[in-house]
Amino acid sequence: MKQPFKVALVEDHILLRKGLASLVDGFQDYRVLFEASNGKELITHLDPGNLPDLVLMDVNMPEMDGYSSTGWLKRLYPDVLTLALSMYDSENAIIRMFKAGARGYVVKYCDPADLRQAMDSLMQKGFYYSELVTGRLIHTINRYDDEMEESLNPISVLNDREIEFLRYACTELTYKEIASKMYLSPRTIDGYRDALFDKLQLKTRVGLVTFAIKNGIVTV
């Protein structure tokens, strides 16, 4: 008999987590292996000899959030698939979770059938791209294209230090932490950020990340 897929639930709201556990256990071919309230608790529950096949990962949690937890899983246990769960459908959250290593993204108010479809897609194909995700990413890329259409070689306008700053801007670091990494003052880092916004005709950090990904400065 085929063994059910093992699922770990990482969600800080207890009632929601318990309801989700009951829902997943009701899906044929799936069973809940364990529950955790944040990334740190997830790490303590993981048994290298009995790993989950799939982790349903909340994005916003105390102690260790979904971005950090997903990145940690990708580094140490790349075969464990992560499906992001969030109340938010912002471009920033979606891009950050996929960059951290998530293979899919669903909102918590989705229909149970949509959650089941996302889980099945991850286990069968290794990824799940919903209309929500593709719509947000396409919108971001199209907006980037509109902003950059007059630039034939956008990277050529950047100097080495600006490119270094741009790579750091694509990480989890705050601008203050980037300043420390680059041995510069926060005011100087603000100057790099504003210069990039001006040179690239962008307005947000999400725009910088999209630019860096599209031009091969960082890889997802």
Image: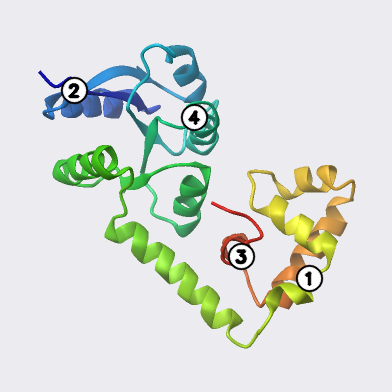
Q: Are marks 2 and 1 in contact (CB under 8 Å)?
A: no
- Residue holding disc 3: 204
Query: Residue 180, located in which quarter of the rendered image?
Result: top right
Query: Residue 152, located in which quarter of the rendered image?
Result: bottom right
- Within 10 Å of the Cα at label 4, are there few (<14), some (14-19), or many (20+) other Cα atoms? many
- Residue holding disc 2: 4
Query: Can you give x and y, in whole percent of width and height, for residue 128 in the image?
Result: 30, 49
Question: Residue type at mark 1?
Answer: Leu
Residue at figure coordinates x 34%, y 19% from the top left: 35
Question: Residue type at mark 2?
Answer: Pro
- In the displayed structure image, the side of residue 6 where residue 116 appears, left or right: left
- Residue holding disc 1: 158
Query: Can you give x and y, in whole percent of width and height, for residue 18 in the image?
Result: 25, 22
Asked which secondary structure carries label 2, the reply is loop
Q: Are marks 4 and 1 in contact (CB under 8 Å)?
A: no
Q: In the rendered view, would you say 57 is above or below 132? A: above
Q: Are marks 4 and 2 in contact (CB under 8 Å)?
A: no
Question: Residue type at mark 4?
Answer: Leu
Asked which secondary structure carries label 3, the reply is loop
